[in-house]
């Protein structure tokens, strides 16, 4: 099946409707599909990545290819991971035929060995139901990413940038802010997508922090983050009782709850704990 009209960008109402009609498809709620139809937002996302010739861009859930198209126009090497076979097929017949620099992987992102790609930039329009597992997967795995830019449900964006003691601040906030610096780029109303979601969305940029932690300290940091929020009403001292060795003393007040600790304080605690263990 060929595409005759290439004048309209994929990030447009006309093009999205045309592609869905051409392939006799509808957006699938089971995949959380809401296609971005505002090209200016797409261009802003791509600009935020500050693409270099050496960059490999990993795109998660490209759908019909709105962001993919903009990336390829920048002559980027793109690996797009798409779970929906129908969407992957459309990408193969449209963008991949025009751009040799596009590779499509028709798999569940969480089941791929994506870290082996060594992608420096990662982008995606992530459905709400899977956004937290994907974010945690990226920051937990060892890979050379430098910038992440995602469209997410606004509620998730608020969590990513929330400050300690804020009602939105939670385990995801702490983990992401330990390894990166999140910044809100733009709030997106429902009409920027087709079909329109029931809630607002947002574009968030996460730039990697240079933590320079040894493996033991890094492992301890993850143990702390994994256990800090086990029981929200308990103090950090109590939630970490299975991790903190007898006799250990921190410069931090561990009688506070986890949501009162900034990301940098979790890192300090991991460093102090690592130093204590090395002295034993």
Image: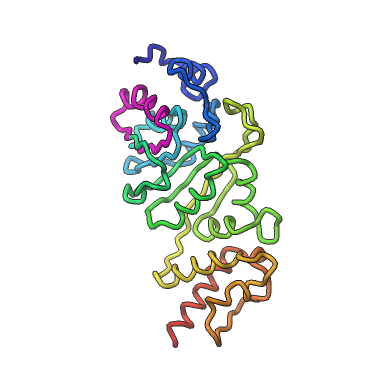
Find residue 58 and report its image quarter.
Answer: top left
Residue 209 vertical position relative to residue 49 in the rendered view, above or below? below
Left or right: where does residue 33 sit relative to residue 50? Answer: right
The one of 134 and 10 positioned closer to us in this rendering: 134
The coloring applied to the image is rainbow
Left or right: where does residue 56 sit relative to residue 234? Answer: left
Residue 232 vertical position relative to residue 111 in the rendered view, above or below? below
Q: Residue at x 67, y 70 (%)?
A: 234
Left or right: where does residue 88 sit relative to residue 159? Answer: left
Q: Check the image and name the residue furthest to the front.
A: 30
The one of 89 and 71 positioned closer to us in this rendering: 89
In percent of width and height, residue 38 lies at 55, 26
Q: Residue at x 37, y 31 (%)?
A: 72
In percent of width and height, residue 62 lies at 44, 33
Magenta region includes residue 45:
no
Find residue 238 and report its image quarter.
Answer: bottom right
**Which quarter of the figure is the N terminus placed in?**
top left
Q: Check the image and name the residue furthest to the left.
A: 100
**Which quarter of the figure is the C terminus placed in?**
bottom left
Q: Residue at x 71, y 55 (%)?
A: 167
Q: Check the image and name the residue furthest to the top.
A: 4
Magenta region includes residue 95:
yes
In percent of width and height, residue 252 lies at 62, 76
- Extent of the magenta region: 79-103
In percent of width and height, residue 133 lies at 50, 50
Total marks placed: 0
Residue 65 vertical position relative to residue 18 in the rendered view, above or below? below
């Amino acid at each position: 099946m060929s595409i005759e009209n290439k004048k309209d960008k994929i990030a447009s109402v006309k093009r999205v409707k045309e592609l869905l009609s051409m392939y006799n498809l509808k957006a699938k709620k089971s995949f959380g599909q809401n296609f971005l139809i505002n090209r200016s937002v797409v261009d802003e996302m791509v600009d935020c990545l500050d693409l270099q010739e050496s960059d490999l861009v990993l795109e998660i859930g490209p759908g019909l290819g709105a962001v993919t198209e903009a990336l390829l126009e920048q002559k980027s090497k793109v690996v797009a991971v798409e779970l929906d076979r129908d969407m992957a097929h459309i990408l193969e017949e449209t963008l991949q035929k025009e751009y040799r620099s596009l590779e499509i992987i028709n798999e569940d992102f969480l089941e791929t060995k994506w870290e082996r790609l060594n992608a420096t930039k990662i982008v995606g329009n992530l459905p709400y139901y899977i956004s937290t597992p994907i974010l945690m997967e990226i920051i937990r795995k060892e890979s050379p990413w430098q910038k992440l830019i995602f469209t997410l449900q606004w509620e998730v964006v608020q969590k990513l940038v929330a400050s300690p003691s804020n009602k939105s601040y939670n385990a995801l906030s702490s983990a992401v802010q330990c390894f990166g610096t999140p910044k809100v780029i733009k709030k997106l109303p429902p009409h920027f997508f087709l079909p329109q979601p029931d809630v607002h969305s947002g574009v968030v940029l996460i730039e990697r922090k240079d933590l320079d932690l040894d493996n033991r300290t890094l492992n301890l940091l993850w143990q702390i983050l994994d256990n800090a929020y086990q029981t929200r009403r308990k103090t950090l001292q109590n939630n970490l009782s299975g991790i903190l060795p007898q006799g250990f003393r921190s410069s931090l007040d561990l009688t506070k709850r986890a949501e009162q600790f900034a990301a940098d304080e979790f890192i300090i605690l991991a460093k102090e704990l690592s130093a204590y263990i090395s002295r034993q």
